[in-house]
Image (spheres, rainbow, N blue to C red):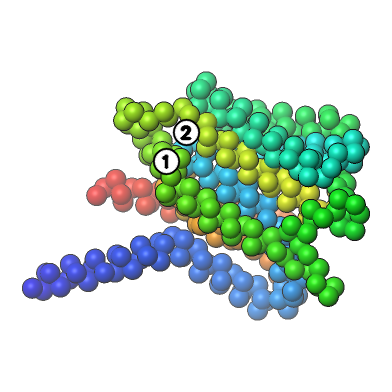
């Protein structure tokens, strides 16, 4: 009877942890603790304008992170999303500003550019069997140069909020009685819900996880592995295109040659949120929570007097801890 009681209690505790989301729950607690810490250390951090700035920064990082979650779940990666974001934004903005295209058409081209490079990355990795790191590093360099080439090396200012066509900026931020309202966060939540459903309740999601867990076994079970592997990168490219729109809506001018390092913030957010670098484990909601860890670090550390160098060091240490947690979890699972 005692053994049964202990077993029942253990099962109840395990179910409670599972319901709370495991690592996601822990990371959420860390986000709350970080916000409280930075707020206590600096009155400026508690200002409404700072919160809006954090959300502004989080939009394009979160969109990239949602997308890159899928290649990561296949045990791959996409290093081109950062420079790709700038490239797509430059090309879309160039068509709007210099070719007099409607803003909606420019936005559509921006997203389509992301999808095209997603297809290219997917074909290089899934069909040609190139290592994901190498393939996407190459497209990272291509997008960085291609965007600058198209615009002639000059920055592109998308229409301002008050200019004709500036309506697209209200997708992420509107003004009410002179106060900025960050409505973009609602779109991010909606996309997280949609992609969580895709990951957990569709063939696309299940096969993405299966490819990352055991690609060969998935192929032998009759799954068209190459197709779903390519689609993981297409999804990533699509969200990089959306991130390009978010970036264009938040910042006044898009500068060629920038964007390097954005992908690290997105990938870092996904890893902190519980996505395994070895594939097969992770969630979109965990990715979003992890992104806010990165965003809070980037925004909060300057408020306590730490320079950019310290920001990079601390962010790197956080990522090391996240990877070590994943390694320990893997070893425990394999030992069972």
* Residue at 38% from the left image edge and 51% from the top image edge: 328
| Vertical placement of residue 208 versus 17, above or below | above
Q: Is residue 41 left or right of residue 317?
A: right
- Residue 170 seen from this side: yes
* Residue at 73% from the left image edge and 51% from the top image edge: 246
Count neighbours of disc 1 (C-alpha within 10 A) and say few if under 14, some if 14 to 19, many if 20 or more: few
Determine which residue is flagged by label 2.
Answer: 228
Q: Is residue 280 left or right of residue 157?
A: left
Return the x and y of residue 190 as percentages of the image width and height. Answer: 58, 58
Question: Is residue 218 or residue 131 the one in the foreground?
Answer: 218
Question: Is residue 95 or residue 65 the one in the foreground?
Answer: 95
Q: Which quadrant does the N terminus fall into?
A: bottom left
Q: Secondary structure at mark 1?
A: helix
- Residue 305 seen from this side: no
Question: Is residue 162 or residue 269 the one in the foreground?
Answer: 162
Question: Which numbered marker is on residue 203?
Answer: 1
Question: Which numbered marker is on residue 149?
Answer: none
Mark 2 or 1: the one toward you? 1
Q: Secondary structure at mark 2?
A: helix
| Residues at marks 2 and 1 touching, judged by CB atoms closer than 8 Å | yes
Q: Is residue 291 left or right of residue 196?
A: right
Return the x and y of residue 156 as percentages of the image width and height. Answer: 87, 42
| Vertical placement of residue 3 versus 108, above or below | below
Q: Residue furthest top?
A: 128
Return the x and y of residue 175 as percentages of the image width and height. Answer: 81, 68
């Amino acid at each position: 009877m005692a053994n049964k009681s202990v077993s029942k209690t253990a099962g109840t505790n395990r179910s409670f942890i599972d319901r709370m989301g495991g690592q996601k729950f822990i990371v959420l607690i860390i986000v709350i603790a970080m916000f409280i810490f930075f707020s206590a250390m600096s009155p400026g951090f508690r200002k409404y304008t700072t919160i809006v700035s954090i959300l502004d920064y989080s939009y394009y990082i979160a969109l990239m992170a949602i997308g890159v979650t899928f290649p990561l779940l296949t045990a791959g990666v996409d290093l081109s999303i950062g420079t790709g974001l700038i490239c797509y934004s430059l090309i879309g903005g160039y068509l709007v500003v210099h070719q007099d295209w409607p803003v909606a058409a420019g936005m559509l081209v921006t997203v389509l550019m992301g999808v095209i490079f997603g297809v290219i990355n997917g074909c290089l990795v899934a069909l040609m069997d190139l290592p994901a790191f190498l393939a996407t590093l190459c497209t990272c360099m291509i997008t960085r140069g291609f965007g600058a080439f198209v615009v002639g090396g000059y920055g592109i200012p998308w229409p301002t909020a008050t200019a004709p066509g500036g309506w697209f900026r209200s997708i992420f931020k509107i003004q009410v009685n002179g106060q900025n309202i960050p409505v973009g966060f609602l779109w991010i939540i909606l996309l997280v819900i949609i992609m969580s459903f895709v990951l957990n309740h569709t063939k696309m999601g299940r096969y993405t996880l299966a490819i990352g867990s055991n690609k060969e076994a998935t192929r032998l079970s009759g799954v068209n592995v190459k197709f779903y592997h390519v689609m993981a990168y297409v999804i990533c490219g699509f969200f990089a295109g959306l991130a390009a729109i978010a970036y264009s809506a938040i910042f006044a001018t898009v500068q060629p040659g920038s964007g390097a390092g954005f992908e690290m913030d997105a990938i870092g957010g996904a890893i902190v949120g519980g996505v395994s670098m070895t594939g097969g484990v992770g969630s979109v909601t965990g990715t979003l929570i992890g992104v806010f860890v990165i965003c809070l670090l980037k925004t909060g550390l300057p408020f306590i007097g730490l320079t950019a160098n310290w920001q990079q060091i601390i962010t790197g240490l956080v990522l090391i801890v996240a990877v070590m947690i994943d390694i320990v979890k893997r070893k425990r699972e394999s030992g069972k």
